[in-house]
Image (tube, rainbow, N blue to C red):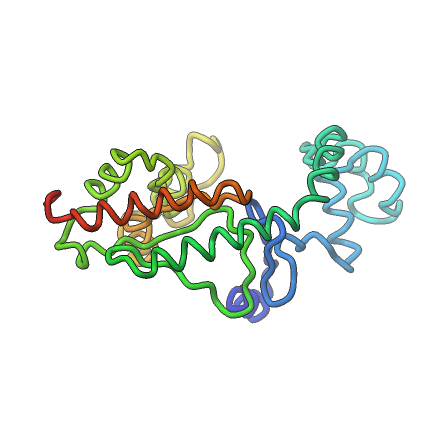
């Protein structure tokens, strides 16, 4: 985020931060997902047109502002949270800190255990980052297991009953998604003079995607035996990896 902020500042770009799946995480002492907190009136009024048009937009956007005439319809989207969902979230947020503490303890245990196993590399958190531990991301190192392919390794984990070990699917590098390759059918009539992306445009991201295995991070104390069973499954597959070659 610090690097992105620097780029945005240099080129006078707006930086929008998506905090999805990172509730409670922080970076550099600031909670993630706080980019809509603003001291800029124009930004605030524009946000109203996306989430609170009609009543709030009519009452809060000044009559002389260029966006005032759109107060009734906004931008055509209503993205505000539903009151029932807000009530549920308010109740759950009261438990968030305890959930995060439990996840952090499980993540610490899993990270320590996997750090001692060849073939799996635990990704270290950068300084100043406190994750929410939505998942534990591991980098698979086939060279440490005689060149055993990741698909074969993953299937062996599943065969041991460790079915929560997962390979990323829809979360591939964005240059591999149809939206960024052939967006035309989604936006008929829109000029498509932008760059079309292809395989190989982002080799580091693509390599990371092809060598990632992820695991959920449970938050309850009674889930620790489950975490231990996943470590045992990984250790067994790694100890017997030559039989899979």
Where the N terminus falls, by quadrant? bottom right
The quadrant in which the C terminus is found is top left
Using the image, determine if residue 74 lies above or below residue 19.
Answer: above
* Residue placed most toward the observer, 19 or 113: 113
Residue at the image position 65 percent from the left and 58 percent from the top: 31
Residue 198 is situated, as x and y percent measured from the top left of the image, at 30, 47
Where residue 234 sits: x, y (%)? Answer: 28, 47
Query: Along the horizontal axis of the image, is 98 left or right of 208?
Result: right
Can you tell which quarter of the image residue 176 is in? Answer: top left
Residue plotted at (52% across, 54% down): 105
The residue sitting at 42% across, 38% down in the picture is 179
Q: Position of residue 235 (x, y in %)?
A: 26, 49
Q: Residue at x 60, y 67 (%)?
A: 28
- Percent position (x, y) of residue 143? 17, 58
Q: Is residue 142 above or below residue 156?
A: below
Please tell me which residue lies in front, 152 or 9: 152
> Based on the displayed image, in which of its 4 quarters is residue 207 positioned?
bottom left
How many numbered discs sit on the rendered protein? 0
Q: Along the horizontal axis of the image, is 154 left or right of 65?
A: left
């Amino acid at each position: 985020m610090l690097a992105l902020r620097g780029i945005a500042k240099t080129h006078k770009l707006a930086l929008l931060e998506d905090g999805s799946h990172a509730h409670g995480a922080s970076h550099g002492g600031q909670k993630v997902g706080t980019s809509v907190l603003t001291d800029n009136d124009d930004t605030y009024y524009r946000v109203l047109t996306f989430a609170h048009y009609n009543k709030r937009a009519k009452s809060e956007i000044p009559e002389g502002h260029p966006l005032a005439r759109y107060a009734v319809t906004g931008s055509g989207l209503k993205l505000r949270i539903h009151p029932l969902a807000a009530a549920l979230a308010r109740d759950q947020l009261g438990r968030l800190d305890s959930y995060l503490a439990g996840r952090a303890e499980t993540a610490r245990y899993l990270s320590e255990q996997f750090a001692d196993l060849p073939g799996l590399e635990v990704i270290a958190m950068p300084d100043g980052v406190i994750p929410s531990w939505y998942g534990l991301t591991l980098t698979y190192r086939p060279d440490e297991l005689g060149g055993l392919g990741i698909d074969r390794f993953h299937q062996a984990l599943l065969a041991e009953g460790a079915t929560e070990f997962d390979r990323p699917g829809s979360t591939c590098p964005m240059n591999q998604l149809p939206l960024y390759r052939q967006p035309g059918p989604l936006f008929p009539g829109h000029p498509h003079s932008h760059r079309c992306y292809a395989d190989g445009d982002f080799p580091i991201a693509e390599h990371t995607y092809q060598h990632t295995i992820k695991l959920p991070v449970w938050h309850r104390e009674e889930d620790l035996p489950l975490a231990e069973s996943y470590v045992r499954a990984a250790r067994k597959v790694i100890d017997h990896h030559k039989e899979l070659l």
